[in-house]
């Protein structure tokens, strides 16, 4: 998700923010750690408040401790949810500190926005938007270099030699002329008394030992032997298990409950009735589910009882007929369109999507009169801390949140709804209660990737080059709800990313966004959110223009990329590695896509096969990526493999629909996700670069979607302007 | 009523309704949380355990259907030759991302390997397509199974 631009302005020509835009000023203080070692307190400067921060009292938000036993302990504000952050960030520190990666251990940061705010998220403590490495790139290396310099100074003082004659390696300081050496642990206490150096020099890329070299992830062992603890695994003593039914129509309420049969189920302890939900509290989930099935609930369905998805789509289509907020304007589109030799028009639409994280929503709460304890896996600790306190009616300092590993985030766990619901239930329960949603509840009461609808037109000159590009689209702004101050003048940077910042030479371009919030269905961030929609639309439409110009899709793109060499390079590389242009059997086709989002350039070529029945199989995906400096190449590859499969799920299967106000999909039979037998071969080619790192967790998802739909066009001649794939349209 | 079930070599007595799925006996009654809940309908494989060596979805396996059968869970699979090879390959190939589904993946893969020392790609697909990974680690799962099959371990 894209939450990083809000700082600067609503949208406009702002580009994806990469690490170089973070202030170069990093504040570091040093002192003795509680255990007698060296403690470095680090300030990751807030982009927005950087000027003020210089004058304000020093407020560190990350901590590095060097213990007397030589361990390096890092407290950092990001959450591990599979993206490899727990390995990539320690690599940055270890590189400059000259320690081995295995010497660095991590502690979860407690919720505190002031201390742990993510600088690219404007100081909000949240893990999202593919930006942990981007935000940490410089400050974490500076912290490592500072600590190393102080440890060397401490050793030099002890030996009474010039610090310049000493060096650091593998957690030791060496004095080569005399062969003396001391471990960091022995020097940590002395180092705490050394002056903090100003302007430490950072290694040039050619000297990197860890950065750029594949590193084993630090969290793997616990994930293969069953000992990794996720939120759903929390078991405070005496915990009861609850499961729930929320109003099947959003906005409905409980009218009447007959719980006699449910109470008779062995192991059921209690039925909790809320305004819009009913929960069954039991000794174990088996009894809770059985009790839930035995409940007879009558609902007052409220105002959305007749709502269907088609109503929402019609509303969006209508919205695109009126002017919206201008997100991008270059040149004079009307004039250029009037003079165009050919005009191409299209309407695109993408459906609501569920997150369907493998770990269903859950939260454990122990609410007492004088305090509240929460066990959960969250991407947004501060947000849930505040929501829990408010719901419990307690001051923040009486609420303790224990964060856990996350069994899939994808934006779902940036929301506080599951925590609020659990606290509401806990108010009626003595002792701790773990609220676990069934898969059906998880899918039918998700907060969904928005439905968006785009109306596009373009004008081509006599040679087929685009001279005018116009796009007006309508749908929900997640940012407007999640962080209202970041929604300005009818725009936000997530909803428009990928729609306004194309890398092609488009001399006349006009993009408008019409915020249209759907009734009766909540929306939220999702893997690659805005770009998951915009890149599909723009890259499909460019493909349509190439077809209208009767030109090869790769050649057509390359001809428009002379001013953006990094973009041009990834297209050329992906095409070459994919064997673009080589003959393919009938009903097999290749499609290409290009994007610059999350500060990363990416091109993909998908190869698909379409059966006579219209079923699509993605056989092979080739991805070329330029994400600046690569910290952990294996993580980059893993994230692209992951994001590609996530995107293919969406193209082939993903769709949440409403009928009579109810989500029609219930479980993995009706909300299908990619399985191993459908998973393609995926090749990743990384462009070497010394630019600052770009984001990696989400980019692959948005890029694959148009690559597949363009490949389907190549294989069948049918252009899909609405997702997911409709096999009936592709049938022979 | 009370049931005596054999899990990872020990016998446990649990007092639950006979139709209670084994998954909840493991997780909530016995506190063995390595086995995961994903769907409750045998659609995703996160809850996979072995019943007498066969990969079984514990979320739809009533406790009264188990009888004398031996249950093996992720907590003990490393003690079997196939399980140890699979776990090692999972680490070598850096398979897990969020990791939540991996207990189930490893249980399915180790059952496959125990019954078929050198599975082909289609056999791997057959054995593993019931296990969903939302992080999309399928490529590495396939590579890891092949590595494990080749290791002498």
Image: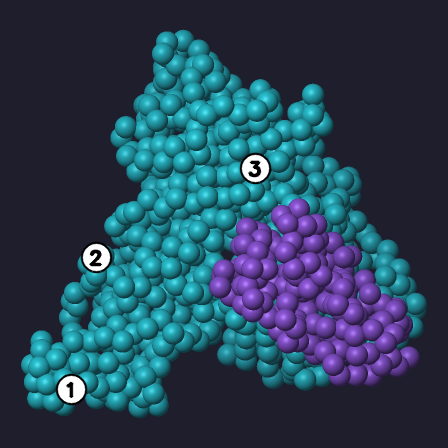
Chain colours: A cyan, B purple
Q: Do the residues labelled 3 and 1 touch (CB within 8 Å)?
A: no
Q: Which chain carries label 2?
A: A
Give the secondary structure at mark 1: strand
Left or right position of A255 against A697: right
Query: Which quadrant of the figure has residue A201?
Result: bottom left
Q: Which chain carries label 3?
A: A
Q: What residue sits 64% from the left and 67% below the top? A: B82
* Label 2: few (<14), some (14–19) or many (≥20) C-alpha neighbours in 10 Å: few
Left or right position of A589 against A308: left
Give the secondary structure at mark 2: helix
Q: Mark 1 points at which residue?
A: A180
Q: Name the residue under label 3.
A: A619
Q: Which chain carries label 1?
A: A
Answer yes or no: is residue A9 visible.
Answer: no
Find residue B66 and name its label: none
* Label 1: few (<14), some (14–19) or many (≥20) C-alpha neighbours in 10 Å: few
| Sequence-wise first label, 3 or 1 | 1
Find residue A206 and name its label: 2
Distance from the alpha carbon under mark 3 to that under mark 1: 59 Å
Answer yes or no: is residue B116 visible.
Answer: yes
* Residue A672, percent from left and from top: 68, 45
Distance from the alpha carbon under mark 3 to that under mark 2: 38 Å
């Amino acid at each position: 998700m894209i939450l990083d631009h809000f700082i600067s302005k609503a949208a406009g020509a702002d580009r994806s923010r990469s690490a170089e835009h973070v202030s170069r000023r990093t504040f570091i203080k040093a002192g003795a750690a509680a255990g007698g070692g060296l403690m470095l307190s680090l300030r990751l400067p807030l982009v927005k408040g950087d000027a003020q921060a210089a004058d304000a009292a020093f407020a560190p938000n990350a901590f590095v401790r060097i213990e007397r036993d030589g361990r390096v302990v890092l407290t950092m504000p990001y959450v591990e949810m599979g993206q490899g952050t727990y390995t990539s960030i320690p690599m940055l520190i270890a590189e400059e500190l000259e320690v081995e990666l295995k010497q660095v251990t991590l502690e979860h940061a407690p919720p505190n926005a002031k201390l742990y705010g993510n600088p690219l998220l404007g100081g909000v403590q949240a893990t999202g938007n593919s930006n942990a490495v981007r935000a940490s790139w410089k400050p974490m290396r500076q912290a490592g270099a500072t600590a190393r310099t102080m440890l060397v100074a401490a050793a030099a003082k002890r030996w009474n030699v010039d610090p310049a004659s000493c060096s650091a390696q593998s957690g030791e300081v060496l004095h080569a002329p005399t062969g003396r050496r001391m471990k960091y642990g022995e020097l940590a206490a002395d180092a705490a008394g050394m002056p903090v150096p100003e302007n430490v020099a950072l290694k040039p890329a050619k000297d990197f030992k860890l950065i750029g070299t594949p590193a084993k992830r630090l969290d793997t062992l616990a994930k293969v032997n069953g000992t990794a603890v996720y939120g759903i695994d929390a078991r405070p003593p005496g915990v009861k298990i609850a499961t729930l039914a929320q109003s099947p129509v959003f906005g409905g309420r409980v009218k009447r409950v007959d719980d006699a049969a449910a109470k008779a189920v062995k192991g059921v302890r209690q039925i909790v009735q809320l305004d819009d939900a009913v929960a069954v509290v039991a000794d174990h989930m088996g009894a809770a589910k059985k009790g839930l099935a035995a409940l007879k609930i009558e609902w007052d369905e409220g105002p959305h009882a007749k709502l269907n998805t088609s109503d929402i789509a019609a509303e969006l289509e209508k919205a695109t007929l009126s002017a919206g907020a201008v997100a991008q304007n270059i040149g004079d589109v009307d004039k250029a369109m009037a003079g165009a030799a050919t005009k191409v028009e299209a309407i695109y639409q993408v459906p609501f999507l569920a997150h369907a994280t493998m770990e269903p929503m859950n939260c454990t709460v122990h609410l007492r009169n004088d305090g509240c304890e929460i066990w959960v896996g969250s991407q947004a600790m501060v947000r849930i801390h505040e929501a829990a306190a408010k719901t419990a009616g307690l001051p923040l300092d009486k609420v303790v949140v224990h964060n856990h590993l996350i069994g899939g985030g994808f934006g779902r766990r940036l929301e506080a709804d599951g925590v609020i619901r659990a606290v509401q239930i806990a108010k009626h329960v003595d002792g701790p209660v773990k609220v676990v949603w069934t898969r059906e509840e998880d899918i039918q009461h998700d907060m969904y990737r928005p439905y968006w609808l785009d109306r596009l037109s373009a004008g081509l000159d006599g040679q087929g080059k685009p001279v005018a590009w116009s796009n007006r689209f309508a749908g929900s702004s997640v940012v407007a709800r999640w962080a209202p101050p970041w929604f300005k003048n009818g725009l936000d940077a997530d909803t428009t990313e990928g729609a306004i910042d194309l890398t092609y030479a488009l001399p006349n371009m006009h993009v408008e966004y019409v915020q249209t919030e759907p009734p009766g269905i909540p929306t939220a961030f999702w893997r690659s959110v805005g770009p998951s929609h915009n890149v599909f639309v723009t890259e499909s439409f460019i493909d349509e223009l190439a077809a209208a110009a009767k030109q090869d899709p790769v050649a057509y793109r390359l001809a428009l990329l002379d001013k953006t060499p990094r973009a041009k390079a990834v297209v050329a590389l992906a095409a070459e590695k994919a064997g673009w242009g080589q003959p393919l059997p009938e009903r097999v086709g290749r499609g290409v896509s290009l994007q610059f989002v999350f500060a990363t350039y990416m091109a993909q070529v998908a190869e698909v096969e379409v059966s006579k029945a219209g079923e699509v199989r993605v056989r092979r995906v080739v991805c070329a990526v330029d994400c600046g400096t690569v910290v952990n190449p294996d993580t980059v590859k893993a994230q692209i493999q992951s994001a590609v499969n996530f995107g293919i799920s969406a193209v082939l299967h993903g769709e949440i629909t409403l009928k009579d106000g109810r989500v029609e999909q219930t479980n993995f039979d009706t909300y299908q996700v990619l399985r191993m037998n459908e998973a393609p071969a995926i090749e990743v080619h990384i462009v070497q670069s010394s630019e600052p790192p770009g984001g990696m967790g989400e980019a692959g998802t948005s890029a694959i979607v148009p690559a597949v739909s363009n490949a389907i066009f190549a294989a069948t001649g049918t252009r899909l302007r609405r997702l997911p794939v409709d096999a009936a349209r592709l049938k022979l | 009523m009370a049931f005596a079930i054999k899990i990872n070599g020990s016998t446990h007595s649990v007092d639950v309704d006979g139709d209670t799925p084994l998954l909840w006996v493991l997780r909530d009654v016995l506190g063995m949380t390595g086995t995961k809940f994903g769907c409750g309908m045998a659609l995703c494989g996160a809850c996979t355990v072995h019943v007498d060596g066969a990969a079984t979805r514990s979320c739809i396996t009533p406790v009264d259907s188990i009888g004398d059968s031996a249950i093996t869970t992720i907590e003990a699979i490393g003690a079997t030759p196939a399980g140890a090879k699979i776990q090692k390959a999972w680490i070598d190939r850096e398979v897990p991302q969020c990791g939540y589904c991996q207990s189930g993946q490893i249980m399915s893969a180790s059952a496959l390997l125990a019954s078929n020392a050198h599975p082909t790609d289609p056999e791997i697909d057959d054995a593993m397509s019931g296990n969903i990974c939302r992080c999309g680690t399928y490529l590495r799962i396939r590579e890891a199974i092949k590595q494990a099959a080749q290791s002498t371990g």
